């Protein structure tokens, strides 16, 4: 297969299986000689903040001279981003070679009792092969959905991280914090330390129980490791970090928003636990590691005059964080909103969260199977005024014409939409 054929073949896989479970993953990995067992892995689950936490941790460890593989989703610009080493996406030819290697196994399972692998199972196996072959020092693995039955949950990591719990993908994971926490806590393994920034009491009790059953040390944010937010500046969020007897100097996260201080703190706490495990890590590199972190589509400024920000806030918790970050950094400025969402999201509720900070909303749509039509999205919007423009590029142009240099345009909603918009700006 060439690259285009490989991508087409990957995308031809089913997205979800009616039969959840890890049997397909275990069978394929066994046929390939268990590449996942060759990885020194750190496993990251959570509703929001996984990508940012992975990025902070990758930068912290890279500054120590380690090579870092990262498996993340979704991608923003190109599919290859999902498998990266030291921030460099896998090459087209290497991705095609991996697809060639995995395809016979996928086809062998067609019509079997356990069924043919999904798209995500297929690329997870490809990623494990890739990182094992490249012999990276650490592999940071982000779950796709949930944790317990996620295809990544075949690894035995050296650390587990659960960023937070929010109400997303409820049709699959459950409709309460306890049920969602139960799925995320499935990544906890026997005697493997766990870090979390989860705050809801009902979710925490589930995580604590899982950690106890696995005899895993549990480290809680603002109890076992802490941060102190100092200031929000044009450069980002200035803060200090503390764990046990270590207190950091002041450092700045270029990723804006108080929630990013939580994510940076999780990454710093992970680095501290790696020191405890005997890895050579120098704390003097922490500020540089945090300060060099970048993660696309997370309150990312893609234009300066006027300011245009893209943010993939696709659930209620993410939207609340976006509204708070806008208040912190652009209080008193006129804010325009361009928004598009998928049909299975509570778009009306999320627009209501943005209502206090937005002067004018525009709703649109994009080319995607589950997209919510612009007209329906407009009907759900509580923001006055809300304008409907089904062509997203035309919407951007119309808004920019209205704006002064001091105004701010925020483009948000589905990450698939953000990916498309970002390409247009580039």
Image: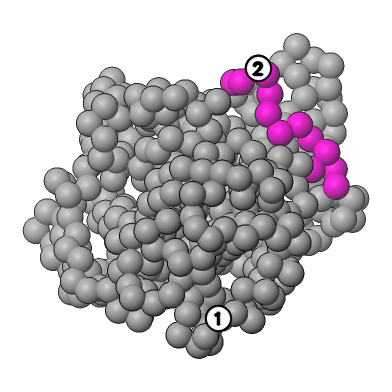
Image point 77% across, 52% down: which residue?
367
Image point 64% across, 81% down: which residue?
401
The answer to if 405 sits in the magenta stretch is no
Colour scheme employed for the rendering of this structure: one colour
Which comes sooner in the sequence, label 2 or label 1?
Answer: 2
* Left/right of residue 257 with respect to residue 424 in the rendered view: left
In this view, 144 is above or below 208: below
Q: Quadrant of the C terminus?
A: bottom right
Which residue is denoted by mark 1 in the rendering? 403
Q: Magenta stretch: give its range.
A: 8-21
Main secondary structure found in the magenta portion: loop
211 and 176: which is toward the camera: 176
**How far apart are labels 2 and 1 at the CA level?**
51 Å
185 and 191: which is toward the camera: 185
In this view, 360 is above or below 288: above
Q: Position of residue 380 (x, y in %)?
A: 56, 44
Residue 60 in sight from this viewpoint? no
Q: Are marks 2 and 1 in contact (CB under 8 Å)?
A: no
* Left/right of residue 395 with respect to residue 40 in the rendered view: right
The answer to if 19 sits in the magenta stretch is yes
Q: Position of residue 299 (x, y in %)?
A: 46, 66
Which residue is denoted by mark 2 in the rendering? 19
* Left/right of residue 254 with respect to residue 17 in the rendered view: left
In this view, 107 is above or below 279: above
């Amino acid at each position: 297969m060439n690259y285009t054929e490989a991508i087409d073949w990957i995308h031809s896989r089913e997205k979800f299986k009616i039969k959840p479970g890890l049997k397909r993953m275990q069978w394929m990995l066994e046929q390939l000689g268990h590449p996942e067992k060759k990885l020194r892995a750190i496993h990251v689950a959570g509703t929001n903040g996984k990508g940012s936490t992975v990025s902070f941790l990758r930068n912290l460890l890279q500054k120590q001279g380690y090579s870092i593989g990262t498996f993340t989703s979704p991608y923003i610009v190109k599919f290859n981003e999902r498998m990266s080493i030291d921030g460099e996406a896998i090459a087209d030819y290497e991705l095609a070679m991996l697809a060639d290697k995995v395809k016979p196994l996928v086809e062998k399972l067609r019509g079997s009792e356990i069924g043919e692998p999904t798209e995500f199972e297929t690329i997870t196996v490809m990623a494990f092969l890739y990182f094992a072959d490249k012999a990276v020092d650490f592999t940071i693995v982000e779950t796709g959905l949930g944790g317990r039955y996620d295809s990544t949950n075949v690894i035995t990591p050296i650390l587990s991280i659960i960023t937070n719990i929010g109400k997303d993908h409820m049709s699959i994971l459950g409709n309460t914090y306890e049920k969602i926490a139960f799925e995320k806590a499935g990544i906890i393994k026997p005697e493997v330390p766990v870090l979390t920034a989860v705050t809801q009491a009902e979710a925490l009790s589930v995580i604590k129980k899982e950690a106890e059953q696995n005899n895993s040390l549990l480290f809680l944010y603002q109890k076992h490791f802490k941060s102190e937010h100092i200031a929000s500046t044009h450069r980002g969020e200035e803060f200090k970090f503390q764990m046990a007897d270590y207190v950091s100097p002041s450092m700045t996260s270029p990723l804006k928003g108080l929630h990013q201080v939580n994510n940076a703190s999780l990454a710093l706490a992970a680095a501290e636990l790696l020191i405890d495990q005997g890895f050579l890590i120098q704390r003097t590199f922490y500020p540089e590691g945090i300060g060099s972190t970048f993660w696309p589509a997370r309150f990312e400024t893609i234009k300066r005059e006027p300011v245009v920000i893209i943010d993939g806030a696709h659930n209620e918790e993410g939207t609340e964080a976006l509204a708070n970050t806008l208040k912190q950094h652009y209080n008193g400025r006129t804010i325009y909103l361009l928004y598009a969402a998928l049909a299975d999201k509570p778009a009306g509720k999320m627009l209501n969260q943005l209502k206090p900070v937005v002067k004018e909303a525009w709703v649109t749509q994009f080319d995607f199977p589950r997209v919510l039509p612009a007209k329906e999205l407009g009907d759900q919007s509580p923001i006055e005024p809300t304008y409907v423009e089904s062509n997203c590029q035309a919407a951007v142009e119309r808004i920019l014409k209205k704006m002064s240099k001091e105004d701010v345009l925020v483009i948000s909603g589905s990450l698939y939409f953000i990916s498309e918009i970002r390409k247009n700006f580039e």
